[in-house]
Image: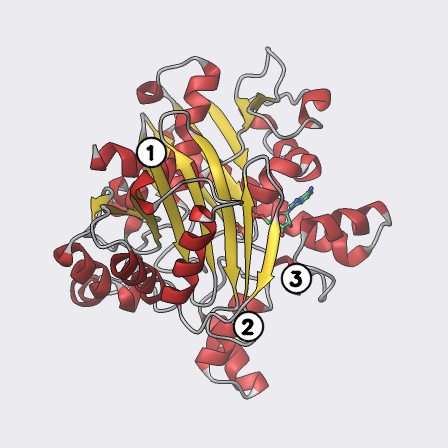
C-alpha cells in the first residue's frame, strides 16, 4: 500500500510517499512559505529529477492540492490516480496524556488533538490544518495520527513530574512529555536488530542530535526517561535552544534587559544553544567543526559545552536504568558528527566504552562503532521518522 506521510508546520509541509511493502520512498518533497509571498514546492520522484516550482499557496489546502497534483502528474508523477494512495500518516507533535499510541483519525481524535493545542501552540494547530486539508481533498482515504509524544508516555511518574505544586499537574497537566518519540522508538528498535539482541532485554540510550536535540532512556523496550519536557526547550543544549537552565534566569534577565518573560523565552528558544554560546558564530555543527579546525575559541566553547551536557544526560540515564548496554547516535549531528561522538564518549570511560576510530569516521549506515571488547556498545543509526510513520499507519489501516 502507498502511504502519504505528511509533516505539516505553520508555513511549511514536508511529504513522502512510501510503499509500505517494500518500505521504499517513491517520491518526496516540501512546500515552503505557505501563506507567504514567494511560496514554492520542491518535488523529487525517486530516481527522477528534483523540480522546484514557485507558485502561489495561500493556504495548506492549496499546498496539499499541489502535492497531490505532483504525485499524479502524467509525466513526472509516481501514481496514476489518488486511488493508489491507500492512507495518509500525519506527524502530530503533541498528544498530551491522551495518546499513548498512534490513532486512526476520526472526529473524536481531532477533538482530542485540539485539546492539546495549549501544550504545543505553534505545532498542533498547524498539524490539524494538514489533517483538514487532506480530509477535503481525499475524503475517503483513511488517515492516521502519529504522535511525537506517544513513545514517552511509558515514563514513570518520578520521571515525568516536576518539583512544583502537584495541583499544577492536576489542573493544567504541567509535566514532562518529551518529543522526537517516533525517532527514539525507531532507532532503539533498530539498534536491538543490529546488535542481534532482544529489544525487551536491553538498556538503550538514544541521542537524537539535530537542530533540536533530545536523549531518551529505553529500558526493556519502554521509554523510562527523556530530556525534553512540557515543551522542547528542556534538556540538551541545541542549535538555538538553551536546554536546562535555572528558571530564575528568566526574571533576572527580564529585569536586566527590560524584556518581558515572553521575550526572554524567545531568546531561550531562538538565540541560545550553540548559536548563543558561540557568540553568534552558528547554530550549524558544520560551521562549528570548521571553527574547531581553526582553533576558533567561540566554536570550541559551544562544542565543549554541548558535548558535556550530552554526556551528563547519558550518565544520569545510567542511573535511571541501573546500567547501559548501548548508546545510539542519530539525526543530523548524531549521524554525521564523529567529533561530537568522540567528545561525548571520551567522557564516558566509566561505562567501558572503546570507540573504533575508523568505524566512527564512516557515515550513512547502521553501524556499531565500538571495538568488540567495548563493554557498552555505541551505534550510529540513521533515523527515519517518515518510514516509522508509514509503518504505524499501515499497521492501523490494515
Ligand atoms: P532537524 O532537527 O531540523 O530535523 P536534523 O536532524 O536534520 O535537524 O539536523 C540538522 C543539523 O545537523 C544541522 O543544523 C547541522 O548542524 C547538522 N549536520 C548536518 N550535516 C552535518 C555534517 N555533515 N556534519 C556535521 N553536522 C551536520
- Determine the secondary structure under disc 3: helix
Answer above or below: position of 310 versus 230.
Answer: above
Residue under pointer 1:
391
Task: Tell me the distance, in whole angstroms, between the alpha carbons under discs 3 and 2.
Answer: 11 Å
Q: In the picture, which quadrant includes the C terminus?
A: top left
**Does the residue tagged 2 have its C-beta within 8 Å of any atom of ligand 1?**
no
- Determine the secondary structure under disc 1: helix
Outermost residue, front side: 74
Label 1 Cα crowd, 10 Å radius (few <14 / some 14-19 / many 20+):
some
Which of the two discs, 3 and 2, labels the residue nearer the N terminus? 2
Q: Which of 183 and 387 is in front in this view?
A: 387
Q: Nearer the viewer, residue 312 or 279?
A: 279
Q: In the picture, which quadrant includes the N terminus?
A: top left
- Disc number placed over residue 267 in the picture, else none: 2
Locate residue 194, reporting x and y percent: 48, 18
Residue 85 appears anywhere in the view: no
- Disc number placed over residue 275 in the picture, else none: 3
Label 3 Cα crowd, 10 Å radius (few <14 / some 14-19 / many 20+):
many
Answer above or below: position of 142 versus 243.
Answer: above
Answer above or below: position of 317 versus 196.
Answer: below
The answer to whether 301 appears left or right of 375 in the picture is right
Residue 114 appears anywhere in the view: yes
Answer above or below: position of 365 versus 128.
Answer: above
Amino acid at each position: 500500500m502507498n502511504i502519504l506521510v505528511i509533516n505539516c508546520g505553520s508555513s511549511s509541509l514536508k511529504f513522502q510517499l512510501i510503499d509500505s511493502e517494500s518500505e521504499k520512498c517513491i517520491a518526496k518533497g516540501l512546500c515552503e512559505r505557505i501563506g507567504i509571498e514567494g511560496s514554492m514546492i520542491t518535488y523529487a520522484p525517486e530516481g527522477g529529477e528534483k523540480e522546484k516550482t514557485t507558485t502561489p499557496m495561500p493556504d495548506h489546502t492549496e499546498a496539499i492540492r499541489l502535492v497531490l497534483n505532483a504525485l499524479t502528474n502524467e509525466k513526472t508523477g509516481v501514481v496514476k490516480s489518488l486511488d493508489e494512495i491507500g492512507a495518509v500518516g500525519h506527524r502530530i507533535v503533541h498528544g498530551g496524556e491522551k495518546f499513548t499510541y498512534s490513532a486512526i483519525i476520526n472526529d473524536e481524535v481531532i477533538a482530542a488533538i485540539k485539546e492539546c493545542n495549549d501544550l504545543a501552540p505553534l505545532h498542533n494547530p498547524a498539524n490539524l490544518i494538514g489533517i483538514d486539508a487532506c480530509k477535503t481533498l481525499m475524503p475517503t482515504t483513511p488517515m492516521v495520527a502519529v504522535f511525537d509524544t506517544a513513545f514517552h508516555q511509558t515514563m514513570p511518574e518520578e520521571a515525568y513530574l516536576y518539583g512544583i505544586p502537584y495541583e499544577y499537574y492536576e489542573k493544567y497537566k504541567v509535566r514532562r512529555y518529551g518529543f522526537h518519540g517516533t525517532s527514539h522508538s525507531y532507532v532503539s528498535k533498530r539498534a536491538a536488530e543490529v546488535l542481534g539482541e532482544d529489544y525487551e532485554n536491553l538498556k538503550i540510550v538514544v541521542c537524537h542530535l539535530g537542530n533540536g536535540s533530545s536523549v531518551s532512556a529505553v529500558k526493556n523496550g519502554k521509554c523510562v526517561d527523556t530530556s525534553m519536557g512540557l515543551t522542547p526547550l528542556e534538556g540538551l543544549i541545541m542549535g538555538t535552544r538553551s536546554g536546562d537552565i535555572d528558571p530564575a534566569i528568566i526574571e533576572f534577565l527580564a529585569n536586566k534587559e527590560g524584556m518581558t518573560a515572553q521575550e526572554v523565552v524567545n531568546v531561550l528558544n531562538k538565540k541560545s544553544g550553540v548559536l548563543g554560546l558561540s557568540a553568534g558564530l552558528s547554530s550549524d555543527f558544520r560551521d562549528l567543526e570548521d571553527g574547531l579546525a581553526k582553533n576558533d575559541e567561540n566554536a570550541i566553547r559551544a562544542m565543549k559545552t554541548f558535548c558535556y551536557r550530552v554526556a551528563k544526560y547519558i550518565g544520569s540515564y545510567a542511573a535511571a536504568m541501573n546500567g547501559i548496554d548501548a548508546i545510539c547516535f542519530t539525526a543530523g549531528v548524531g549521524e554525521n558528527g564523529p567529533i561530537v561522538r568522540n567528545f561525548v564518549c571520551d567522557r564516558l570511560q566509566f561505562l567501558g566504552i572503546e570507540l573504533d576510530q575508523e568505524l566512527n569516521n564512516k557515515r550513512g549506515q547502521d553501524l556499531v562503532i565500538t571495538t568488540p571488547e567495548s563493554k557498552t556498545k555505541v551505534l550510529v543509526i540513521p533515523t527515519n521518522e517518515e518510514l516509522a510513520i508509514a509503518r504505524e499507519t499501515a499497521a492501523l489501516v490494515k
